[in-house]
Image (cartoon, grey):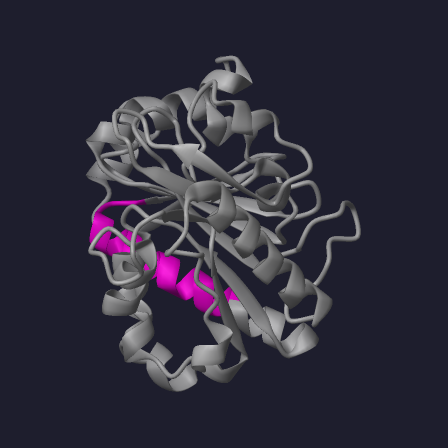
Amino acid sequence: MEKKRSDAEAEVRFFESSEELSTGLADYVHHVSESAVRERSSFSLALSGGDIPERLGKLAGLPYLRTVDWAKWHLFWAEENVVPKRHPDSFYMQAKQHFISKVPIPPAHVVPAGHEMPGEAAADAYEFSVRQQVKNRMVPASPACDCPRFDLVLLSLGPCSEVSSLHPNHPVLREGSQWVAPVSVPGSQRERLTFTLPVINAAANVVIVASGSDVARAFCEAMADRRPLALSPAQMIQPIDGKLVWFVDAGAASLFSGGGAVASTSSS
């Protein structure tokens, strides 16, 4: 059973289990896509890593497979590992395995990040690709800033409050002009690409998925809103003219004041 909590800045949706969260997320993505298609005959979705690719697999089943207007979808990536396209750690490959290969989205509407070049060059190339999509009006421009206005950006909360490879105290948190930036993965030599905060915050809708007890403290701190922003990138997700919704399961909510109620609620 889903429970909702709203305030002036964000809506928080609580779920008893990770499975119920996935179902709720699929319903929400479907709803946003229908609204976007009705409004301008197109739906732009930016994915991230973590458990997002697997959760989107729900959309490959019924009723979504038959009811979604897949021909109007355009897919992008809010973050990506700088690895070969078919590498197991490629978020594109993970999304293809769990989702893209199972639904009839036109291949030309899938815009993956650059995989066969170093981080800085890959970031520049992907930003160019996104700018071309804005120029061609596949993605609208934000009326509030010089950024694309994606219909929906899906993010996953990490244990250190990171989202979309935006880690605490990283210089990229202050980036104001680039749309896509290369970042190093903490504890690894690997590079990633990430949308910068202005791009994410220009979206019409942003979802942050918080799942599992390993992110319970990060979620609780984000809700308390007491840490310096640079230490909690999740708190820096503040759409300037859009909507932010948290999707939270019982594990992630276990340290939150509402966590007990969520855990004890039974479906009817």
Frontmost residue, 47 versus 5: 47
The dominant secondary structure in magenta is helix
Eyeballing the image, is 61 above or below 49? below
Q: Position of residue 4 (x, y in %)?
A: 44, 44
- Is residue 159 one of those drawn in magenta? no
Residue in view at x 42 percent, y 79 percent: 105
- Is residue 28 one of those drawn in magenta? yes
Eyeballing the image, is 214 above or below 181? above
Frontmost residue, 176 versus 30: 176
Residue in view at x 43 percent, y 79 percent: 107
Q: Position of residue 138 (x, y in %)?
A: 64, 71
Q: Quadrant of residue 246?
A: top left
Task: Answer yes or no: is residue 12 visible.
Answer: no
Frontmost residue, 124 versus 75: 124
Tell me which segment is drawn in magenta: 15-32
Eyeballing the image, is 223 above or below 18? above
Q: Position of residue 240 (x, y in %)?
A: 69, 40
Q: Position of residue 235 (x, y in %)?
A: 51, 27
Task: Answer yes or no: is residue 227 visible.
Answer: yes
Residue in view at x 24 percent, y 66 percent: 98
Q: Is residue 39 left or right of residue 13?
A: right
Farthest residue, direction right: 143
Residue in view at x 34 percent, y 24 percent: 160
Image quadrant for the C terminus?
bottom left
